[in-house]
Image: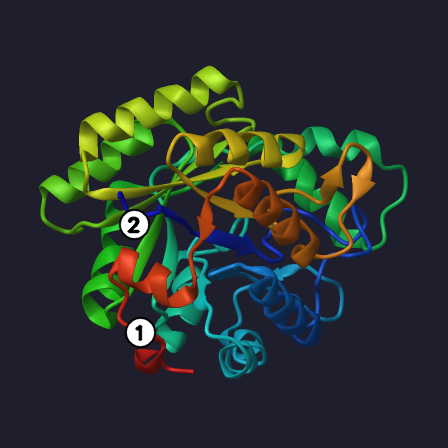
Amino acid sequence: MAAVRKVIITCAVTGSVHTPTMTPYLPITPEQIARESIDAAEAGAAIIHLHARDPKDGRPTPDPDVFMQFLPRIKQNTDAVINITTGGSLGMSMEDRLAAPLRAKPELCSLNMGSMNFGLYHVTEKFTTWKHEWEKAYIAKTKDLIVSNTFAQIERFIRDLGHGCGTRFECECYDVGHLYTLANFVDQKLLEPPLFVQTIFGIMGGIGAHPEDLAHMRRTADRLFGADYHWSILAAGRHQIKLATMGACMGGNVRVGLEDSIYLGPGRLAKSNAEQVGKIRKILEELSLEIASPAEARAMLKLKGGDRVAF
């Protein structure tokens, strides 16, 4: 009998996209981020993907001291793989984006595989009042801002974190060209399999969220990487659960969380990250798929282990 395939659930707890005005359930303080992460792990997430927020007003912050207020607590209370962003947020410098990962030396970091337009500006039309002054300008500036991930920047992340700290990467691919960029770094022997390829759908500026887009990214990744990668699906907003379910049926892993969508269903805000994890877990189990434990995720992705991080 063939072995049952294990599906890794990643939960992206807070991110840098949504703002406090958009939902009252977005975790902001280190206490809230820690609690949400622990609850998501208990609900079935093997990997917890983390950004930090200024606890005073919720704006994204790269400050490693803020990360260190929640990273040890999460590690002490769960066995989950902790994945720290290198994407940071709009306008952060390379030094900003490297500060927390270099301090923490985590098992896993996100790694964007290309520069892109990242359009959120249309969201400003949905709100007439904002909870904090920074929010509207932060979202509006995405109309005239490029998220920079040049070949040189990507190589620096790989060398400083991958080669320097033993960190592996959640390789974030927002479009087909990003898969080819990833293949280039593999060809150069800068990255080694198994790859963890997170294909991302529904961001304005990246590939769309049509089922054909999902299938095309899968076919392209199969052709480029063969059996040397683990595929995962992240879809923004209302597309989150639909595309994750479709991708899981096609052999993929899944990512949910309030970074990617603030909803649990049509017009219904998710009250926690654990709600989203619980929803996708139930769907996967109804499809006769088994959920990977943190230990199984570590083995699949060949991670260095939680005993070799710096927090």
Asked whether, in this view, residue 215 is left or right of residue 278, the answer is left
| Quadrant of res 102 | bottom left
> Quadrant where the N terminus lies?
top left
Q: Secondary structure at mark 2?
A: helix
Q: Position of residue 254 (x, y in %)?
A: 48, 44
Residue 203 sits in which quadrant?
Answer: top right
Is residue 64 left or right of 192 when viewed as pictured?
right
Please identify the residue farthest to the front as the structure is shown.
1
Extreme residue in the top direction: 212
Asked if residue 205 lies left or right of residue 37, the reply is: left
Counting from the top left corner in percent of width and height, residue 56 is at 75, 70
- Give the residue at mark 1: 305
Q: Of 71 and 8, which appears nearest the observer?
A: 8
| Circle 1 crowding by C-alpha within 10 Å: few under 14, some 14–19, many from 20 | some
Residue under circle 2?
153
Horizontal side of residue 255 vs 30, given as left or right? left
Say which of marks 2 and 1 sits in front. Answer: 1
Tell me the amino acid under the disc marked 1: Gly
**Residue 258, visible in the rendered structure:** no
Residue at the image point whose x is 65% and y is 42% from the top: 261
